Image (tube, grey):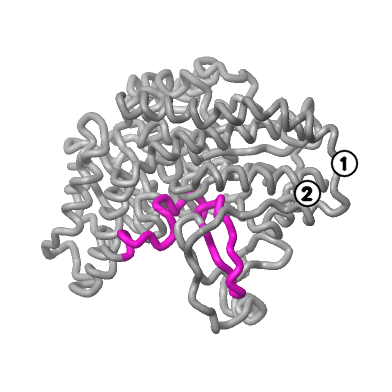
Amino acid sequence: MQRLASSRRLLQAALAPVRAQSSLSAAAAAAAPAPENAFAAAPKMPPFDYTPPPYDGPRAEEISRKRAEFLSPSLFHFYDRPLNIVDGKMQYLFDEDGRRYLDAFGGIATVCCGHCHPDVVEAMVNQAKRIQHSTVLYLNHAIADFAEALAAKMPGDLKVVFFTNSGTEANELALMIARLYTGCHDIISLRNGYHGNAAGTMGATAQCNWKFNVVQTGVHHALNPDPYRGAFGSDGEKYARDVQEIIDFGTTGRVGGFISEAIQGVGGIVELAPGYLPAVYNMVRKAGGLCIADEVQAGVARTGSHFWGFESHGVIPDIVTMAKGIGNGIPIGAVVTTPEIAQVLTRRSYFNTFGGNPVSTAGGHAVLKVLEKEKLQENAFVVGSYLKERLNKLKEKHDIIGDVRGKGFLLGVELVTDRQKKTPAKVEIGHVMNHMKDMGVLVGKGGFYGNVFRVTPPLCFTKEDSDFFIEAMDISLSKL
């Protein structure tokens, strides 16, 4: 609580100049003539003391040719001219020509400590020099040390860790554990949610964009408690009634579990309406089910106010899944549950060859140490709130911004061509992304309609980076 109070004081200090300057800047903007070429007025990127080594590898054209010939045709890329990223340092990326870009996407909310953080790299290199892979059939301290450190970050009796290689694997395992423990196959998830692209997780995912025509059974998709587009606004308890109706009219009255994100990432950074999760957790548990928190994107300090996204809703899940941020780019995921629930996997042999790999877990443990040492959760809260405040100021200026939402460094900016009808600005967002890239800013997009900016930078993102990001977005929006 002391740290949070301190963070709030820092936040108030950070926001003071934004609020004080907003009226002045608005008046100045109204008086000043628009530049003949907006790019001529491109903002200056904050200074950064790093120069990448010269790159003499294949150019973008050659890589694109090989990718088209040898990689899956399902792969896609951002931008009219795909970027060849060859180097990264903290919150910056560098292309084949050494040009620097501010990374406001973080490898899809994955890089938390910063690209190539020296402490994480050192931990992985040192472990790789000793042993790169053995098997969990032998003892190694790296996996045990990381599991202990993760368990220390969890509330209640959540202290047994199963390691996987990705968020999809983690969610697959969590769904299986819930079904085994309860003896019930029915799972409830949310419309617009994303939980992975394997058999079970594709069933729990509720966007047709990510679902193939394969057998997906036993999942019921509840009304999404979306404060912006939902039928009940921010009234979480009204949305929760749909879950009770699913239990009463769509199942035997018993369910295996409920899975949701605290903030929907792929779905467009949608915050769940207040009061929703406590009500639903109560309903699901009365029906014999387990509550699963998918923290793949919202977890690991990204929201700033809490280490885990579910904590801001005042609930304690029965199972927590994670990936992305816990490895800072290392392919690692995890499922954390209680000792009692964990026992279900002893009924048969459960094994994951690479889950808990020494190099991956050594790196993951280093990530937790860096988050603590550099106070990155506090930074996500203070700077993320400052950035959101500035985004809301942009909303006042640009009618195309329909909504600004999220917490910390998990922020969404939804573009619409009509604020009343909330018509998705699908084409316009691509133009803005390309303009921002040309000015040196990389940002993601998502949402069902593909019209939401996903602002998920590394947690070392600074106030100066935020100002540069806002200026680039402002100029790009003005060019529409």
- Which tag is nearer the camera, tag 2 or tag 1? 1
Amino acid on which disc 2 is placed: Val
145 on left or right of 69: left
381 on left or right of 44: left
- For the residue pair 161 and 145, the one nearer the viewer reads as 145
Q: How many marks?
A: 2
The answer to whether residue 52 is magenta is no
Q: Residue at left 80%, top 36%?
A: 417
State the image coordinates of residue 64 (x, y, percent, origin top left). Answer: 64, 76
Q: Which residue is mark 1?
A: 33
Regarding residue 147, the answer to whether it shows in the image is yes
Q: Residues within 10 Å of mark 2 (few under 14, many from 20)?
A: few
Above or below, 60 relative to 18: below
Q: Which residue is mark 2?
A: 427
Above or below, 429 relative to 20: below
Q: Residues within 10 Å of mark 1 (few under 14, many from 20)?
A: few
Q: What secondary structure is found at the residue carrying circle 1?
A: loop
Alpha-carbon span between mark 2 and mark 1:
27 Å
